[in-house]
Amino acid sequence: MIDSAEIQTAHSSAHDPVAKAVQAACQRIAPSWPLDRFIAVNPWWGFVDESIQAASAQIGHLCGSALTMPMDWYLAQYAKGQITDNGLREALKRRGLAIDADAFWQQCAAGMADSAPPARLMLFTEALDARRDLRHLPACQDVVIHAIGQHCASWFDQGQARWRPTHATSLYAAWQEIAAHDNGPSMLLGINGIAGRIAALPAAHGELIGFVCRALNIEPHEYAAYFSALLLSSNGWAAWCAYLRWQAGQQCQHDDHLEQLLAIRLAWEWVLADSAGDKALLDDWRAARRMPGKASDDSPAWVWQDALDISWQQQVSQGLLRPAPPAAAPPAPPAMQAVFCIDVRSEPMRRALEASGPAIRTHGFAGFFGLPIDYLPFAGSTARPQLPGLLAPQLRVAAEAATPEATAQLLARRRFRLGFSQAWEGFRTTASSGFGFVETAGLGYAWKLLRASLPGKAAAGTVPGTDSDGLQDAEYARLRPVIGGLALGDAVNLAAGVLGAMSMRAGFAPLVLLVGHGSQTANNPHAAGLDCGACCGQTGEVNARVLAGLLNRRDIRAGLLAQGMALPEGTRFVAGLHNTTTDEVTLLDTREMESSHGAALAQARQWLAQAGQRIRAERAPALGLAAQSPEALLEALRQRAGDWSQVRPEWGLANNAGFIAAPRERTRRLDLQGRSFLHDYSHADDAGYAVLELILTAPVVVAHWINMQYYASTVDNRRWGSGNKVLHNVVGGNIGVFEGNGGDLRIGLPMQSLHDGENWVHTPLRLSVWVEAPRDAIASIVQRHEKVAQLVAGGWLHLLCIDPEDGKIYRHALHSLGSGDWLPEPAAP
């Protein structure tokens, strides 16, 4: 134990190097969004200032995680032809390795090419565990992570628990207050005096960090790495705290929960070190802690990863450069246009819809439709973002009826019904009434559970949500999402900007569909991860309806005409929602158009139904559904969507690998197998390349986050994924999940989103981005934006140019943030 004088000395000292290292460690932790806004994130976002191989070496040093698949997996891909001979030769060539591809394969198969993994930075809890009898005693590391996880779950609870265990004012203070009276860890570990040592720690988390660094003889040059390793040992809760920090930063504020979490984890290091009282162990730990890591991960697995990426790139590039068949006649004006989200699940739907006739044109655009909005549900108190997590909302959308009187009437009805439901829920779940609930309603509730477990007639494929809770269908249909406080001039500029970014300035069809998307699942904590990532884990319904409403307004059309953008009098914009689980598309807010556009709407519904039928048949084998009639398959998918025991309702964005920004004519004839984000872009219509800059700095980065979330959750699901969803328990309302009853918060994707029980469904490829635009324009934008340049220079994604001048494809090799070369891509054999 330390005495009060020693604590006081630590308190009174200034620790600028400590504070600097704390911030450096905190910046390494990527945020994880809550379940109701669950979006994909690159969990290594804090390391993108390094190359991916340098980051791999650092992460391996800090927590022992690899950023590649096991060698036997790559060798299996080579045997199956997923890695081609040409891809492997090109990968070896790019790395300057003078070895034949066959000889390299033989070395790897024999294990002769393996390199030593990075040396681990050992935490004291791990050093202590190395000397404990773990056959009969619990691991200190496990007990500490579990204790921290339970405390964070209690502190951050968002209403799931009925009472709070403490009234302390901070995460760290609450931990010290509770842990100082908790003898559980001492009993579990067989170590006396833990609670007393915690009680004697400094009361301020900043002072605690400085004190422990002194007490454990941590050198200033070790601070940042040691702090990072500590945070990564509780990476799930660190990611949640990083989310709070991210959100505060968007409001120009600061949140210090991540620093407090670091202090708690650091406190456990000192408490166990002081309790052990073993100088020899401390000396050995200090020596092990100072073993240097590698500057870069030189594992041959990276050659194979390059080869895997290149093999797929070459196949896609070959298709992109394939000459289009000669047109039999000039294309007719479109009878219908449909704008879909760039989500990879839209690519098969677009392909199937276009197959219904040459008069159908589809377009790809980010699924938030360029609207910087959040949405306040009807009678709600909290707005939710409806835009990418990278951005902060600028406009508020709320649901309203046609008149203030009708709005007030519906508001009163919904609040009354929801209030009754909440009272019933309180009776059902409160500790004091739980037994009474069983006596009162237990038998009736058993029927509800039984009914949910039995197959029955499936509901039509509308995407469920909570926005309509407390309202009847007819009542909910009377509501419209409306932007508040938006002046006419600003509305016109917003509409013009969106149409310009869509590359839609002329040639409008009589019917233009704006199709958002959402999934339909039951009993799925990660349901938002299957919805629209560009809408922050919500469906795209609100955004599609708002934009359609704006573009149908006469005053906005008049303003657009004044800017030289004429929307035909007979053109109507119609919002739609693509159910990605059943591939049904529902058209919204069409009642007022039926008289003028009834025939066009009927034709649109027929085309959409035909497209859905094609895609369902295409997707069925991957879902394990046998060949059957179209009607039976639709029914099976609807039942699957409503089955609360179904762990794989759909595959989401599994196998995503590419992003293509080009005119639709470039990709229209290709079957891209639902693996590519498709963003329509015409460089000829983009004066000054403002739209191109927007694409490279926003949708491409969002797609990279999605791609890396799937990649990371595959290469190391134990650390960057959320494990087995059958074992998930929701934490704190919407914060995240535990796998089982505790441990660290689990981030990333569950195994069932990536693996079918026998094989990986997702193949971890780094995102390949093809852009059809002049090379100089692309390079100029990349060099102006540091993060984008880092992603390209560091090998986090691949950037390729389809040159409009010579029709060839070039790869951008950015050597530094200021200079880069375009290298011609070799043709696939």
Image: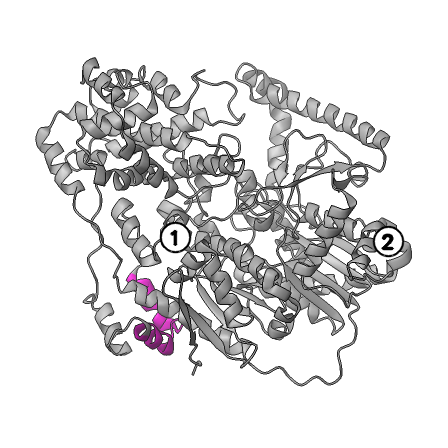
Mark 2 to mark 1 CA distance (whole Å): 49 Å
Please tell me the numbered disc located at residue 593.
2
Q: Identify the element where label 1 is drawn.
A: loop
Instruction: Name the dominant secondary structure of the magenta segment.
Output: helix
Q: Label 1: which residue? A: 48
* 73 lies above or below 379: below
Q: Position of residue 640 (x, y in %)?
A: 60, 50
Q: Residue at x 80, y 68 (%)?
A: 335
Q: Is residue 573 left or right of residue 696?
A: right
Judge by depth and name the residue closer to the eye, 670 or 618: 670
Residue numbers of the magenta segment: 71-93
Q: Residue at x 31, y 58 (%)?
A: 53
Q: Identify the element where label 2 is drawn.
A: helix
* Residue 91 among those drawn in magenta: yes
Q: Position of residue 440 (x, y in %)?
A: 63, 18
For marks 2 and 1, the one nearer the N-term is: 1
* Residue 775 among those drawn in magenta: no
Amino acid at circle 2: Met
